[in-house]
């Protein structure tokens, strides 16, 4: 009696939703987190009560490059998910997902480091 031949089926690739949905949620949460981090004001006047910009923080100009990079990386993820062949898709999307996480962590670290600097009172 002979044994049946082993199956040599190729694994079916994951649907695109398994990549796009979690990474889209991560992008939205990352943008919301970076935007919500308190930013120190550039300079505060020593008066009482303090001006509103001293309480809420300065302009988000230092975070805008990180926000743009996160949006750009998600756009690259969507584009690559649609255009890259299924054989290379996990590698490319994994690298782009790691880059998005790295951009978020660097942006978070830079925002928190800027918040630790002493304020300049004039």
Image (spheres, helix red, strand yellow):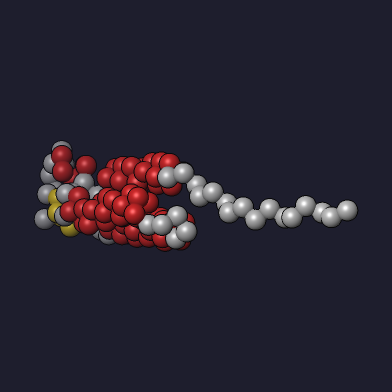
Residue at left 46%, top 44%?
15
Q: Residue 12 location in percent, x, y?
A: 54, 49
Residue at left 78%, top 52%?
4
Horizontally, is 102 left or right of 57 in the view?
right
Q: How many marks?
A: 0
Residue at left 23%, top 53%?
68
| Among the 4 quarters of the image, the one containing residue 108 | bottom left
Residue at left 88%, top 53%?
1
In the image shown, does 66 or 3 lie closer to the viewer?
3
Q: Residue 18 location in percent, x, y?
A: 46, 43
Q: Residue 55 location in percent, x, y?
A: 21, 42
Whether residue 94 is visible = no
| Among the 4 quarters of the image, the one containing residue 65 | bottom left
Whether residue 43 is visible = yes
Q: Name the outermost residue toward the front.
A: 1
Horizontally, is 52 left or right of 108 in the view?
left
* Image quarter of the C terminus: bottom left
Q: Residue 32 location in percent, x, y?
A: 31, 42
| Among the 4 quarters of the image, the one containing residue 33 | top left
In the image shown, does 16 or 101 lie closer to the viewer?
16
In the image shown, does 85 or 50 lie closer to the viewer?
85
């Amino acid at each position: 009696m002979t044994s049946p031949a082993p199956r040599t089926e190729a694994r079916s690739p994951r649907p695109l939703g398994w990549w796009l949905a979690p990474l889209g949620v991560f992008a939205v949460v990352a943008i919301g987190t970076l935007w919500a981090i308190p930013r120190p004001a550039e300079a505060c006047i020593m008066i009482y009560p303090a001006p509103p910009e001293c309480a809420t923080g300065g302009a988000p100009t230092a975070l805008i490059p990180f926000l743009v990079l996160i949006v750009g990386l998600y756009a690259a993820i969507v584009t690559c998910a649609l255009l890259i062949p299924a054989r290379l898709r996990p590698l490319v999307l994994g690298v782009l997902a790691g880059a998005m996480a790295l951009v978020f962590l660097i942006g978070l670290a830079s925002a928190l480091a800027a918040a630790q600097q002493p304020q300049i009172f004039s």
